[in-house]
Each structure stands twice: as C-alpha cells, then as structure tokens.
Amino acid sequence: MQTSNPLIRTLIAISGAIVFLSGCGESIDARQTQVVNGLIYKRNATDPFTGTLKNYQGMARYATGCEEPTEVPVKDGLFDGKITCTTRGRKSAELAFNEGKKHGDWRVFNDRGEVYIQVGWDNDRRDGIDKLYGPHAINPSEPIRDLVWKNGKQTGTVIDDGSFMVFRYRDGLRDGEQLEYGVHGGSKLYLYKKINFVRGKAQGIAQVFDPRGQLVQEETYENGDRVSVRDVGNPKPAAEAKPRATMTLRECVDGKIAALHKEQGEDAMIRADTLAEFETNCATELITK
C-alpha cells in the first residue's frame, strides 16, 4: 500500500528505523549463539550477530581476571567495544576490541583494585604502554615489565623472575647494560654479571662477580662474540663461576611458562603471582633433587 501523505510516510520511516535500531541493540545469552567461520551468529539467524552477549565465558583466554561470565559487545559477528570483567563483585579487568582485534588500553586489577597489568594494543599489535607489576625477587619497588611499544618494537626494561635477569631494550633490540643475578645459599640473590649490549649484540667488557660482590672475571665481547676471558683474583673458569642452580631454575620456570602457553595460547597473560608460584615450585624441585 502506498500513501501520498507526507506525515504518514515520515511516521512509517521513523517506525522502521526504530525497529532496525532495536535489532542492533539486542541482548541475548551467549548460549543462544554459535560460531560459523569465525563469526558469531544467533542460532538459526542468517546474518552475523550485532548486540550484547550476556554470560559469555570465553574471555579468560584473553586475560587473567576474566574467568567469570561477562557481557561482551558484538558487531557484525565480531567482538567490538569495551569489556569489563568482574571477580566476586569487583572489577578485575578492562579490555577493548575493534572489529574482533585487540585494541586500546587493557588493564588487569589486583584484589586491592590496583593496576598490575597494563598493555596497549592497536588492532592486535602491541602499541604504547606495557607494564606488569607484582612481587618479584630482584627489586620489589620496580615493575617486572616496563616497556613502550612503537611500530611493533619495544623500548624499556624487563625483569625476568624465572632467570633472574634484567633485560633492557631499544627499538626491539637488547641495548644498554644487562644484569644477571645468581642464587647463593639456596635463596639469596646477588649480582652475578653485568654485560653491555649495542643494537642486540654483546659489546665491550662484561664483569662477573662472586656472592660477596667481588669482581672475579672480565669477558670481552666484540659484535656479539666473546673474544677473551680474564680472571681477576680468582682462577675459577667462567663455565663454573655461575651457580648451576640459576641455570636449572631458569630452565624449569621456562618449561612451566611454555606449558601454560601451550594450554592457554601464546597470547595468554601470565600473572605475577603465577610467575612467583612457578619460581617457588621450581626452587622446591631443585632442593629435593
């Protein structure tokens, strides 16, 4: 039926727009959906879903703190918009997506409401701030990871709990003074080695120390290769200067991290308390061997 009345035509157009918009804002339980070729569909629908998924339980694969069901905005079958995760009634994480890709500033909160993970994304690529806070064995006052990403390359510092090393990066390459710690007496850390990197390669003189802080060896590097070793008041060879416990502990923790990534995916964030647990378990295993 057609009408020539302008007012009626206008009302019909507005009504149609309201119906269309209400469909875009549909909110359904996640159990009413299915995934086809990577897109989310409402069951028995022919077009990808746009609206809000309630009680979605799959966000844990993206970030810790999202283990409980949450609401997820979807557009044309893909995650799109901001997501707030809660744990036992408190906000535990803030995530965001753009057309299905990680985008914007992601934050994970501890039980006190403090940010302990902050990562910036630009369409699935790291971009901007990348920080991880938490208890660790080297210096509790510093972030474990304190980086800034630009064009896919990181600049800043990473403190590796598992290997007791401090890595410094510039434009994606190790650059500047790198520190490595040893373990003495089963638990006490001490500075074991200082070595300088230039554009990803060891360069210059590296210093090796004993648990008392005494310089015992100097290693000379050129373009990444060690070209000479000089003992300083200690004839012990370089291969024996570093405690075996440090190397074994690193291998143990790395193995646990690899196993977690295999189970949860390479993008799975590893919490500071999880790293501490890995370290404790590995230390126990080493003592009992």
Image (cartoon, rainbow, N blue to C red):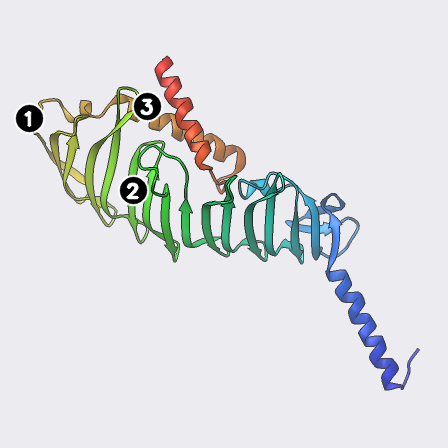
Count of picture labels: 3
Reading the image, the residue beneath label 3 is 248
* Residue 241 drawn above or below residue 59: above
Q: Amino acid at mark 2?
A: Phe
> On the rendered structure, is 195 left or right of 65?
left
* Residue 192 drawn above or below residue 83: above
| Foreground pick, 198 / 166 | 166
Q: Amino acid at mark 1?
A: Gly
Q: Secondary structure at mark 2?
A: strand
| Foreground pick, 260 / 107 | 107
- Residue 132, given in percent of the width and then of the height, sits at 41, 43
Reading the image, the residue beneath label 2 is 167
Q: Amino acid at mark 3?
A: Thr
Q: Secondary structure at mark 3?
A: helix
Residue lying farthest top? Answer: 289
Circle nearer the viewer, 1 or 3? 1
Q: Quadrant of the C terminus?
A: top left
> Which numbered disc, 1 or 3, marks the residue that appears first in the sequence?
1
User: Which image quarter: residue 10?
Assistant: bottom right
